[in-house]
Structure formats: structure tokens, C-alpha cells
DNA sequence: CCAAAAGTGTTTAAGCTACACCCATGA
DNA sequence: TCATGGGTGTAGCTTAAACACTTTTGG
């Protein structure tokens, strides 16, 4: 079938060599909301998986790169004009049967967003919303996920957690300028463990280029308290040595 | 064009929504040969890129998962009956124009192989061979690479180097049983830096489940010397704390 | 003055580096 | 016995965890 699809290619293949696949991008967009690591999901209105929650995404266009497709969908889905944050490829998922309609290979992307407005606009209500990652995965909450998106979300989560260890990407979760307490809250939310602020401060400050102080500026404490120094993101992208989390699954 | 390709899908899309792509897997197979980190390349006989070296790979079959496609190609390309080693997804590459014939998305895989026989069989000579990674990339050696395979190789290389830091995958480069010197040689080859054997030993031994001693067995020294204890791979997969390399590009 | 949040100092433990030294084998 | 590669002990440095303490604001 449809071997003429590539008939104008200089060296004609026939379609049995390269059956056509649909290629999509799926976005795992993470942010911190109310002190919890959260991700954006959209409610499916049509079968398959009508009524289930799914990662935002869409088909890759004919003349568009994979990264470009992800970058195009990102502002659309988060309802912002320009997306400021971090975007990277996560992994690809292409099991036969993952979409009952046809053979689809999905290239998943991982995005780090600073706190964005809840996308529950009037008519859009319940179509797209932020979910706390724990609530999505703790199953008993009745969140049903479409396709193999649970697998993708789990992979994305692990990547986020790992990346905070050895990169400066935590700063992509906070709006500038930010305090050390803000940054600390990101780590606590993502790793879900206490993490002493006092030693955290020392480690962050000792990594040159992680964060830079905004000259002499301060922020009044909310209900009293000493004003914190304000910072913005530095030039560094990797942490050496890394910030380490204790993992239950691995004992030293 | 060819919208009937998916005409039998329960919810008819038209092809403008999901133009067909070809999907391939490309393999970056790494091993240690003569103390150097090496990878398998095949010589292209046809245009495009005839006479250039390329990563082995091929089209994903219609009813085959991505991992399955990579696992199928791996023994074919390395000319072994069963591939023992490590295989994981690396990343996907889908820029328009990366293949001049048609739109191809390639899912690259990364494989760790113990030292395999040189695949230069008689009639096959110069069709596929192991290249030292440095020689492939140092450009002046006249190795021309097909497609965007230089990018893929660079990504694969960085992944190999990083993985030795925090996983036990170095053991996948040596045949069992092996000595601590063998394992040390893997790290030296991959990282390309001295690494003190004496402290390396301590770190490896202190990580429970990294390697386990083969009961009392020893190997005669080649040109004299004390016989080394023999080990096999343990159950552990991750290293805590990691083995750290010093990186030039990043200063603490 | 008190509560609250920010930030510093200090003790102690743990890990890592470097280097000296001992062990077991072949020639 | 010497050369060679395998393996251990240990002193000293560096990093990190824990916790007590000081600073600066609002009420």
C-alpha cells in the first residue's frame, strides 16, 4: 500500500520496508503548586480513553523537528504567550497497540515551569488542570490515565528528581527573583523529604554560578521575620559535587 | 494523500493530521578493544552517504516494539548468536532532512558489549568494524559519518561516561570472570584518565553487590606477578555513592 | 518584648587521596 | 633473587550532618 508515498525519493523503498508510523510528542510539564510537585494533564473527551486524563501533546508536523514540535505545543497547552523554562527530550514510546487506532510512536518531552496560572478558564474548566504528582499516581484517587501515560509520567518524575541532584534546573521552578527558601521549597517538593535548610544553603552558596545575589535587594517577611536576600539564576548548569538525596531504594 | 492508510481506524484521522514517518532504530554499540573504548560502525555502499561510516540499524517492523527492534538488530549486527550485555534507549532524532529520501525518526539505542570478535569476516571485510571512539571523532582521521550519526555518537559517548559514574554497567564491558584490574581498565578506557587503582579497589569493594568474588579462584599472572582474585557481576545496579570522574569542563 | 523567618559558627563524623608497604607468582 | 602485578594500612585532608546560636523584621 501507498508505496507511492515515497515514490519521489531518490532511492525508492517499498512500504514493506518502512511501514508508516504516526509520530507525536507528549509533554510532561512539571511545576510547583502549593508546595507540591504537579504536572499538567488534559481530560480526554473522545474515545479511546474518553474520560481519562492524558498528557498534552499532538502530532509532529511534516516539516518540523521533534524539539520544535514540543516547543510549539508547550505554550499552547500551558496557555502562556512565551514559555520560559526548561525543555528536554525524555524518551520515546512505541509499543504496538499503545494506541488502538494506529501505530504511533510518541516522543515524550520533559518541561520545568515556574508556577503558572491555573488553566481552568471558564469554558475550559476541567479540560486541563494541574495535578499533584502524588495524587495522580497514588491510584486510589480515581485518576485514570490514558494510553501508556502512567509509564511516561513515572519516567518523567524520576528524571526530574535525578536532575535536581546534578543540575541547577531547580531554579527553573521558581520565578526570579527568588529567595533561598523558595529554592529550598522546590527541593522539598520534588524529593518529598525534609532536607535541612541550613546545610542546603551552604551547598548552594558554595557552588559558584548556581545562583547570584540581586544587589542588596530584599523581600519583606510575610508575617514578620527577617527579609531574605534575593537571587536570580546563575550561569552554571551542572552541580559539582551534586546535591544528594537519600533514596530508600538504594542503600550505601 | 493516502488517508485510506488509516481508514479502518475507529476514529478516522486524515493524513494532514498525522503524516506518515518512517521509524528506525540506530545502535551505538560500545566495547573495549585493546584498551580503547570502541564502537561498531558499518560502511555504507549506497547513496546517500555512500562510502561513509554509519551506525548499524534498520527499520522498525509493523508489529514490533522499539526495544524489540533494537534487540533484534543487535545480534545481527554484532554477529553473535545471543547478545549478552546491556541495552537501553538513548534518544530520538527526527530533524526534517536528516535523511534526504524521506522523513525518518530514528530511535537510538545504547549497548554495552564485552569484547566481541572483530566482525571482519572474509567477504564482509571493511563492511563493519570496530572503531576506537577517539579515532572516529578526532576528524583528522578522515572518518566521514553518515546522516546525523556524529551527534548520536557524541550523545552515546557522554551517556556511557556518565553511566559508569553511578551504575555498575562497567561490568558489562568485561567477560566473566574478571579481575579488579580488568574492571579498572574499563574505567580508564572510557574516561581516558589515570584513576588510581588502589583507591578504585576500595570504592568498588565497599559497594555491596557491585562485584562478588568467585570462590577462591585465581588467574595466573601473564608475565609473572601475583594472581588476581576473580569476580563476577553482583546484583547491584546503581552506585551509592557514585564513582566520580574529574571533568575538565566543570570546575567545582 | 515576642514570634517568625533568615543566616552563621562549630563540633564531629565520614569519605577520599596519596603514598608507603606487604604478598604471591614466574623467570 | 628480582621483576611484576595484586592487595593492605594509614596519616592527613576535605566534605558533610547536626545543632546551637545570632540577626532582622512585624506585631
Image: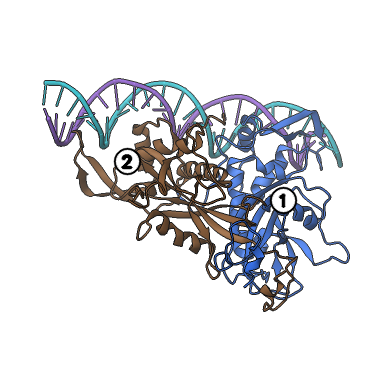
Chain colours: A brown, B blue, C cyan, D purple
- Between A168 and A126, the one nearer to me in the picture: A126
Q: Which residue is mark 2?
A: A182
**What is the x, y in percent for residue B164?**
61, 44
**How many marks overall?**
2
For this orientation, the residue located farthest to the right is B122
Mark pair 2, 1: CA separation: 44 Å
**What is the x, y in percent for residue A91?**
57, 52
Q: Is residue B183 left or right of residue A231?
A: right
Q: Chain of mark 1?
A: B
* Quadrant of image for the N terminus of chain B: bottom right
Q: Residues within 10 Å of mark 2 (few under 14, many from 20)?
A: some
Viewer can see residue B84? yes
- Between B6 and A223, the one nearer to me in the picture: B6
- Between A124 and B130, the one nearer to me in the picture: A124
Q: Is residue A173 left or right of residue A27?
A: left
Viewer can see residue A168? no
At a point 70% along the width and 56% down the height, the residue shown is B38
Q: Secondary structure at mark 1?
A: helix
Q: Is residue A236 left or right of residue B225?
A: left
- Per the rendering, the mark at residue A197 is none
At a point 40% along the width and 44% down the height, the residue shown is A130
**What is the x, y in percent for residue A203?**
39, 39
Q: Which residue is mark 1?
A: B68
The quadrant in which residue B2 appears is: bottom right
Q: Secondary structure at mark 2?
A: helix
Q: Which mark lies nearer to you, 2 or 1?
A: 1
Q: Is residue A114 left or right of residue B56?
A: left
Amino acid at each position: 500500500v501507498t508505496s507511492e508515498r515515497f515514490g519521489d525519493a531518490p532511492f525508492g523503498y517499498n512500504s514493506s520496508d518502512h511501514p508508516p508510523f504516526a509520530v507525536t510528542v507528549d509533554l510532561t510539564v512539571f511545576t510547583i503548586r502549593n508546595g507540591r510537585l504537579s504536572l499538567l494533564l488534559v481530560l480526554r473527551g473522545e474515545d479511546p480513553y474518553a474520560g481519562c486524563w492524558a498528557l498534552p501533546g499532538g502530532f509532529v508536523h511534516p516539516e518540523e523537528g521533534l524539539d520544535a514540535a514540543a516547543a510549539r505545543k508547550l505554550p499552547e497547552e500551558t496557555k502562556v504567550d512565551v514559555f520560559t523554562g526548561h525543555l528536554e527530550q525524555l524518551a520515546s514510546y512505541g509499543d504496538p497497540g499503545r494506541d488502538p487506532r494506529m501505530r504511533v510512536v510518541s516522543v515524550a518531552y520533559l518541561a520545568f515551569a515556574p508556577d503558572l496560572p491555573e488553566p481552568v478558564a471558564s469554558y475550559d474548566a476541567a479540560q486541563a488542570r494541574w495535578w499533584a504528582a502524588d495524587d495522580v499516581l497514588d491510584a486510589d484517587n480515581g485518576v485514570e490515565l490514558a494510553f501508556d501515560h502512567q509509564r511516561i509520567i513515572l519516567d518523567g518524575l524520576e528524571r526530574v528528581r535525578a536532575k535536581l541532584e546534578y543540575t541547577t534546573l531547580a531554579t527553573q521552578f521558581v520565578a526570579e527573583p527568588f529567595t533561598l527558601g523558595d529554592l529550598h521549597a522546590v527541593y522539598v517538593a520534588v524529593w518529598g523529604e525534609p532536607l535541612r535548610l541550613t546545610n542546603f544553603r551552604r551547598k548552594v552558596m558554595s557552588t559558584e554560578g548556581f545562583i547570584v545575589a540581586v544587589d542588596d535587594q530584599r523581600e519583606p517577611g510575610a508575617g514578620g521575620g527577617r527579609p531574605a536576600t534575593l537571587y536570580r539564576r546563575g550561569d552554571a548548569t551542572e552541580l559539582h559535587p551534586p546535591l544528594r538525596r537519600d533514596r530508600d531504594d538504594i542503600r550505601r
